[in-house]
Image (spheres, grey):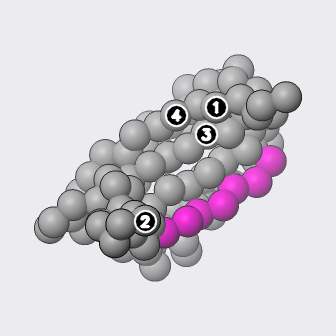
Amino acid sequence: MILVSVMYPSGAGTRFDMDYYLKKHMPLVSERWTAKGLHDYTVVKGIGTPDGGEPPYQVVALLRFESVEAFKTAAAADGPEIFGDIPNFTDTQPAVQLSAYAE
């Protein structure tokens, strides 16, 4: 099992349509990728840093995938559609990180 973190940067003047993201984009991700190894996902909204600063990421999606290979296969198959949807909800590009669960 791996964790794919999709992190959307914060910043003055950035746009993020959470309603679209939760009601259209993430259901699209789930619809396309569940059969390809996506187990589930969680979306979190950045609210700040411990010292009261702005969060570095305004939204982070945490996707649990069966394996790195499953994620790569899913991204290759449906990436153009899913990544092509990004401009519909934000004007930023996400940072993506693959992580393994510590044992």
Q: Residues within 10 Å of mark 2 (few under 14, many from 20)?
A: few
The reply to whether the C-beta atoms of the residues labelled 3 and 4 are less than 8 Å apart is: yes
Disc 3 or 1, which lies upstream in sequence?
3
Q: Residue furthest top?
A: 69
Residue extent of the magenta highlight: 39-45
Q: Residue furthest front?
A: 51
CA separation, marks 2 and 1? 24 Å
Q: Label 3: state its secondary structure.
A: strand
Residue 50 tag number: 2
Magenta stretch containing residue 40, yes or no? yes
Q: Residue furthest left?
A: 13
Q: Residue furthest right?
A: 103
Q: Residues within 10 Å of mark 1 (few under 14, many from 20)?
A: few
Tell me which residue sits at (38%, 56%) in the image: 57
Which amino acid does the dot numbered 3 rest on? Val
Task: Give residue 56's position: percent from left, percent from top.
Answer: 34, 55
Which residue corresponds to mark 4? Answer: 97
Vertical side of 68 occupied by 7: above or below: below
Task: Give residue 20's position: percent from left, percent from top.
Answer: 44, 73
Which amino acid does the dot numbered 2 rest on? Pro
The reply to whether the C-beta atoms of the residues labelled 2 and 3 are less than 8 Å apart is: no
CA separation, marks 3 and 1? 6 Å
CA separation, marks 3 and 4? 6 Å
CA separation, marks 2 and 3? 24 Å
Which residue corresponds to mark 3? Answer: 4
Task: Give residue 66's position: percent from left, percent from top.
Answer: 80, 33
Of residue 1 and residue 37, the one placed in the foreground of this image is 1
Tell me which residue sits at (47%, 37%) in the image: 96
CA separation, marks 4 and 1? 6 Å
Residue 99 tag number: 1
Of residue 74 and residue 12, the one placed in the foreground of this image is 12
